[in-house]
Image (cartoon, grey):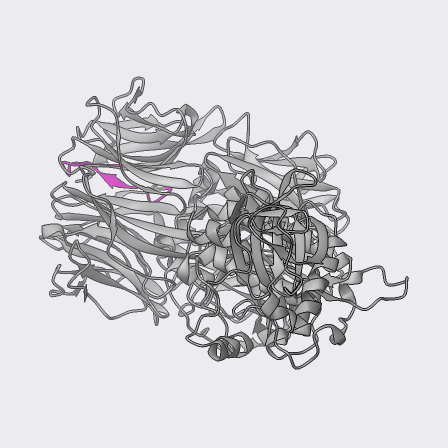
Amino acid sequence: MNRTLQPQDHISHFRVVGPLGGGGMGEVYIATDEALDRNVALKILPPRLVRDEDRVRRFVTEAKSASSLNHPNIVTIYEIGKDRVRGSEAGVADDPSSEPVHFISMELVAGETLGQKIHEDKSDLRSLLGYVAQAAEGIAKAHASGIVHRDLKPGNIMVSKDGFTKVLDFGLAKLTEKQPKEHEDRTEAPTRAATTGEGVVIGTVGYMSPEQVQASVVDHRSDIFSMGCILYEAATRRRPFVAPSHVEVMHQILRERPVPVEEINPEVPSELRRIIRRCLAKSPDQRFQSMKDLAIELREVCDEYESLPISGASAASQASGVLGARPPARRASTMLLSVVGVLGAAGLAFGLYSLVGRGGPAGDVGSRAQDLKLSVLTSRDDLSEATLSNDGRYLAFVSSRDDKSTLNVRQVRTGTDVQILQPQEYFIHGVSFSPNGDYLYYLNQDPDSPAYSALFQVASLGGTPQKILFDIDTAAGFSPDGSRVCFRRGMPHQKADTLVVAEIATRQEKELVRIKTPERFQSSPAWSPDGGKIAVAVQNIQGGVRSWVLVIDAASGRQQAVGTAGLFTAVNSVGWLPDGGGVVVAGFVAGTPAPQVYRVAYPDGAVRRLTNDLSGYGNLSVSAPERAVAAVRRTGVSNLWVVPADGRQAARAITFATGATGSSKDIAPLPGGAIAFTVAESDKAHIWRSEADGSLRKQLESQGLYATTPKFAEKAGVVFMEFDEQERVNHIWRVDPDGGGLRQLTSGRGETLLSLTRDGRTMLFQKWDDPSALWSLDLQSGGEPKRLASDLIDQATQVSPDGRLVCYSDFTTVQDRLYTRQVVMPIEGGSPVAQFLLPPGMTKSSWSPDNTSMTYVDRNKGWNLMRQAIAGGEPTALTRFTEGQTTDFVWSPDGRKIAIVRRLGKGESVWVFEPGGGEPKQVAHFPTGNVSECRWSLDGKSLVFAYGTATQDVVLIQGVA
C-alpha cells in the first residue's frame, strides 16, 4: 500500500512515527506532537482524495463533530488543520508545489479494536458487553448533541489496555437540524439531508441499517441497528449479514433475519438475545428509541450476567417445561398432593411438559391469541415462581441458587429489583401480594415443625418476616378487602383435601370445603373481585384423569363445576378476571405441548385458549387496572451424554435435540452398553433404544400417546408406562430390548410403575383408584397382583439390591405432628422388619449395596451423602463436601462406587468416588444447565446422564377480555 506519509515525515508540528491503519475516510498514523511532547493519532486525508470535495467535507465534518463532544468514551480531538508534508529530515523546507494535506490530531488509544477483542483475543462475552455498553454511553452523548455516527462497527471502537472504550471515526456523522428550545430530547430530531444527500449510500456494508441501505434520511436509531450488528458479532463471533457481494448483503439487511443467536452460541443469555433482536428490527420504530436506554439495558445484563438464564434453542424449537428444575423440599402434609398430582397428570413424573412437541388442543376451544399482546417482564434461569401485584406496579419473584432462595420485588415500570429477604435455607414458594400491595406473603419451612410449611408476612419493601399461619400447602388467596385468606391444607392421613379460610387479624380458621381421594385440589385458590366466590382447580384420576375449575360460595361452601368437562388433564393455576366474568387458568390438555393459558367464562364455562406455543405456563396472577395476566413461562431442552467412569475420556453427547422434538430423558441401561430412553416426537413421546455411541437408534413401541419411565431387568425386559388417550389412564407394558415381545401387563383403571427387582421377577406399582396401596406382580409366574401395604404416601418405593426387601414411606405422629417414616418389609409381604425416620432435610434416598442401610442426601449437613442403618443408630457421612449442592447420586452395579451430581453456582458436574478409597474424581462438567438422571451402565464401566438447559420468563399477557 502506498502511504502518504513515511516515518520521520513532518506535517505542521507533528513528526510521524509509523502507520496505525486506514480506511475509506483516511490514513491514520502514530505521531509525536513536538510542541506538547506527546504521542497522538494523526489522521490525514491523502492528496489524491483532496480533489473529492465530498470526502473533504465529510473529513472536516468528522473533526467538527467529534471535537464538539466531551465524553470519556469518545476519542478526544486535539486539533484540525491543513499543511504540506516535509521530508524525513527535520527542518527540511516543504515543497511549494506539493498539495496541502488535511489532518486531524486526536487522542492516541493504546489498545485493540473491539474487532480484535472479538475475533483474535476471543474475549469472554461479559467483557465484550461491558465494552459495548461503554461505547453506547459515548454514542448516547453524541446523539444528545445532535450527532449520528452512521458508521459504527467493531473496527471503530477501541479498547484501551486498562479496559476503557473509545468510539472513533465520526467521519460519516450527520448533524441533526437545530430544533426549537422546547425540544429537550435532541436524539429525536430529524437529520439534515444536505450533509450527504439522499440517494447516496454511505457506511460500512454489513453494519448499515435498512434506511441507510435504501439511502433514506436516517436518525439516531440507525446507530442502534448498527450496535445490534456489533452485539450479534460479539455473541456469535460472526456478522449477522454475510454474503459474497455487497448487493446480496444489502438485500439481507432489507429482507432477511439473521440466523438466531442461540443456534450459533447456545450459551448466550436470553435477555441479551432479546436486546439484539430489538436492535435489529427492520423498522426504526420497533428498535430501542434511544441509545441511552440500550446502554442501561446492557449495563444491567453485565451486572446480572451470572444469574441470567442461558438459552438452549431457538424460540421456534424450544421444548417446554423446566428440565431438571429443582423442586422445593418435600413436606409431610403435601406428599399426597405430589403423589396424586403425578398420577393424575398421566405419567408426568417423567416431566411430560418438557418433552412433547407442538400439537393442537383437544376439544372445541376457541382461540384469540392474535388479539393479545405478550411482553417479557424478566427472564432468569434461577427463577422458580412470580406474582404480580393487584395494581400491576410490582412483580414479586423467587430466585433460587444452590441451596438458597431469595424473595425479590421488581418495579415493573423501571425494571429495578430489590431483594426483600436474605437467602433462605429452604425454598420460598407460594408467594402472593396483599390486595393493597403493602405486604408479601410466602411459604417456607416452619421453624418449630420442620416437616410443615408456614405462612409468613413481610412488608413489600422489606423488613422482618412474621409467621402468620401454620400448615399451609398453597399460596394464600386474599379476599378483596385483605382481611381473610383462603388456602389448601392437605389431610393425607385422612385421605382428604380441604380449603380453609382464615382471618388475618385473629388467626381464626374455618374449613370451607373438604373433598376425598381420588379428588384433590390442584391449584391455589383465587378469591373473586366481589368477594363472594372462590375458584380453585380440582382433579380426579378415577376412571381417567380429568381436571376442572370449581367455584365455591365463600359463605356457604356451595360448589359449582365450571368449564368443559374432561378437557383438561391438569390445571396448575387459576386467577379471576377483574370483572368477575371468568377465570384464567394454566391448563394441560392431552395431545398438546405443554400447559397453556385459557380463559374460562363464568358462569357458562366457555373456554378460549389465549396462548399457543411450545412453552409451559404457570403461576398466573392478574393486574386489575390493565386486565393483564402475568405468567411464568418455562422452556428447555435435554439430551443424553455418556462418559467413561474412569474419566479418561471426555463426556460426549449421543442425542442432539435443539428443541422439543427429539428431547430425551428417562434412562434405562441395557445389556451390551445400549440404552433405552424416552424421546419427544411432535405431540407424543415414545421409547427408543440406541447403542452407547448413539448409533442404531430404534423405536421400541409405537402405540399410545405418551410412553414414559422405562426400566430394565433381565427377566422382565423393558417395562414402561403408556398413556391411553381414549381411556385417559396409564397402563404398564413390557417389551424386549430389541423391540419384540410387546405385551400389556396391567389393564385396570390406571396404574403407575414404581420399581422392579434387579432380576426382573417382581414389579411394584400403584393403582389410580387406590393410590395409598402398594401392589406387587410376579412377572414370571403371572397371576393376580398382591397387595403389600395400604399406607403408601409417595412414589419413592425401592427394592433392596438382593430383591428381598422393599422400603416405602408412610406417616407417623410425633408430639401431635406428622412426620415421614421409612418402612421396610419383605417383598413377599408380611409385617415390617424395620421402621425409622430420616431427617427433614433429606432430599433423596436409596438402598445401600449392603441391603442393611439407606444412603441419602442431607441438606442440613452440607448436602453430603449419609448412610443410615435400617436397624437404627447414628448416620455416618460418606462425603465431606464443604460447598455446593448434591443433586443426585447412584451406586454402581457392583456396589463399590458412587456417581454423584454436584451443583456449584451455575455449573453442574458428575463425580465418581469409592467410599473410603480416596477423593472424588470429576468426570464431566458443564458451566451452565442441569445434569439429571445419572445412571451406570450394566457393566459399571460408563455413566449415562441427561443434560439440559432451561429458562424461565415472566410474561405479561395484555388484551385479555
Q: Main secondary structure of the magenta part?
A: loop
Looking at this view, name the residue that lies furthest to the top: 874
| Magenta segment includes 211 | no
| Left or right of 594 in this view: 178 | right
Query: x and y percent of residue 322 in the render?
Result: 44, 53
In this rendering, the answer to whether 579 lies above or below 467 is: below
Looking at this view, name the residue that lies furthest to the bottom: 199
Task: Please state which of residues 460 and 579 is positioned toward the viewer in this rendering.
Answer: 460
Task: Please state which of residues 99 and 150 is positioned toward the viewer in this rendering.
Answer: 99
| Left or right of 531 in this view: 768 | left
Looking at this view, name the residue that lies furthest to the right: 181
Picture quarter containing residue 207?
bottom right
Q: Give the total of numbered labels.
A: 0
Residue 337 appears in view: yes
Residue 537 appears in view: no
Task: Please state which of residues 227 and 485 is positioned toward the viewer in this rendering.
Answer: 227
Task: Please state which of residues 308 and 733 is positioned toward the viewer in this rendering.
Answer: 308
In this rendering, the answer to whether 284 lies above or below 672 is: below
Magenta stretch bounds: 793-807
Query: x and y percent of residue 273 in the render?
Result: 52, 59
Query: x and y percent of residue 235 in the render?
Result: 48, 55
Q: Quadrant of the C terminus?
A: bottom right
In this rendering, the answer to whether 204 lies above or below 902 is: below
Q: Residue at x 75, y 71 (%)?
A: 191
| Left or right of 947 in this view: 516 | right
| Left or right of 357 in this view: 271 | right
